Image (spheres, helix red, strand yellow):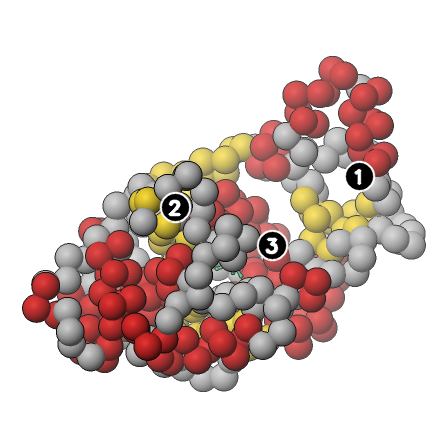
């Protein structure tokens, strides 16, 4: 059951990181979140996730926004930039710390490696990057610390509208995870949840590369006493070598002049079966068809080589 059927107003979003222009993979996420929102008569917000300056490409926020408009997707309200949200992230950390849910961690990667060598019994657990809890009981702030959320939960279960029941053993597979880094930058996991709560987002549609972040985020919703959204994760567009199409694997920027073709291809990718007669129509006509005929049950939970 989605939020609409529970009688709540639908609010969705697209939340790109400005680390490069839109490519076909990110177009699929933008389009699916847009169509899901519009088909549910809801709002669709855009948030620029610019919390990691070293990974940003100057000007890509503007390029992404231009591309969205060229592809017929107009957002509601103002764009929220995460770089303006430091106070909110600090307030959330403060609340978590008041409830003794986080701790300061002074471990460096080098120290964690050394610990692993000295404690071979824990090796299998530590090999997956699970934090061994060295600083867990540390109460006071020390310089050059990260802040981690304590994980005591065992199995975390949630229902994804495309992938069905998803489970993750948070303590064994993830462990105490970082919310604020040693270098002072906020972790994606914290920022995304704080902002989705702040913006009243109750439906999240995004790529399946974030499926395994979802239990961490659901746990944060719990810790912050907020209601969790509904989730729809989307299959990824893969290159022929099986790698995800991404900025890192050199995905080409979308050509805005080919917006109708791009949207048509993205609809097909999403299993929507647009009729061939739609080819050659304007981008707005193709998007309108997409809204009228949107059926998220047709999305196949399997990555696709494009
Ligand atoms: N900013 C993330 C990205 O560009 C997406 C975050 C999300 O949708 O939760 O991959």
Please tell me in which quadrant of the rendered image residue 262 appears.
Answer: bottom left
* Outermost residue toward the top in this view: 121
Query: Looking at the picture, how far across and down is residue 260, in whole percent?
Result: 25, 72
Return the mark for residue 109: 1
What is the quadrant of the N terminus in the image? bottom left
Label 1 CA crowd tier, 10 Å (few <14, some 14–19, many 20+): few
Return the mark for residue 177: none
Residue under the image location 30 percent in, 73 percent down: 259
Measure the alpha-carbon separation of dots 3 and 2: 24 Å
Residue under the image location 15 percent in, 57 percent down: 273
Of residues 161 and 23, the one drawn nearer to the viewer in this rendering: 23
Query: Looking at the picture, how far across and down is residue 305, in whole percent?
Result: 33, 44
Query: Looking at the picture, how far across and down is residue 230, in whole percent?
Result: 39, 56
The residue mark sitting in front, 3 or 1, is: 1
Residue under the image location 80 percent in, 57 percent down: 183
Q: Is residue 247 left or right of residue 163?
A: right
Of residues 25 and 179, the one drawn nearer to the viewer in this rendering: 25
Residue 36 vs 283, above or below: the answer is: above
Q: Is residue 151 left or right of residue 23?
A: right
Return the mark for residue 189: 3
The residue mark sitting in front, 3 or 2, is: 2
Q: Secondary structure at mark 3?
A: helix
């Amino acid at each position: 059951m989605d939020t609409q059927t529970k009688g709540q107003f639908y609010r969705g979003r697209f939340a790109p990181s400005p680390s490069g222009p839109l490519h076909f993979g990110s177009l699929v996420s933008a389009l699916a979140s847009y169509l899901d929102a519009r088909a549910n008569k809801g709002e669709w917000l855009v948030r620029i996730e610019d919390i990691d300056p070293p990974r940003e490409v100057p000007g890509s926020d503007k390029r992404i926004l231009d591309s969205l408009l060229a592809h017929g997707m107009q957002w509601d309200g103002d764009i929220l930039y995460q770089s303006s949200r430091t106070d909110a992230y600090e307030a959330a950390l403060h609340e978590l710390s008041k409830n003794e849910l986080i701790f300061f961690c002074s471990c460096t990667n080098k120290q964690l490696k050394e610990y692993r060598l000295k404690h071979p019994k824990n090796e299998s657990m530590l090999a997956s990057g699970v934090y061994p809890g060295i600083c867990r009981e540390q109460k006071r702030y020390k310089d050059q610390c990260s802040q981690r959320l304590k994980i005591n939960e065992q199995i975390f279960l949630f229902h994804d509208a495309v992938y069905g029941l998803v489970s993750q053993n948070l303590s064994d597979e993830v462990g105490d995870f970082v919310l604020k880094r040693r270098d002072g930058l906020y972790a994606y996991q914290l920022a995304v949840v704080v902002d989705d709560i702040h913006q009243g987002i109750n439906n999240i549609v995004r790529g399946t590369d974030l499926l395994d972040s979802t239990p961490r985020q659901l746990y944060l919703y719990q810790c912050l006493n907020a209601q969790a959204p509904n989730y729809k994760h989307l299959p990824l567009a893969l290159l022929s070598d099986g790698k995800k199409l991404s900025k890192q694997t050199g995905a080409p920027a979308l050509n805005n002049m080919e917006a109708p073709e791009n949207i048509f291809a993205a609809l097909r990718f999403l299993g929507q079966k647009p009729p061939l007669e739609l080819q050659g129509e304007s981008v707005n006509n193709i998007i309108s068809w997409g809204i009228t005929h949107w059926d998220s049950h047709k999305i196949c939970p399997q990555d696709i080589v494009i």
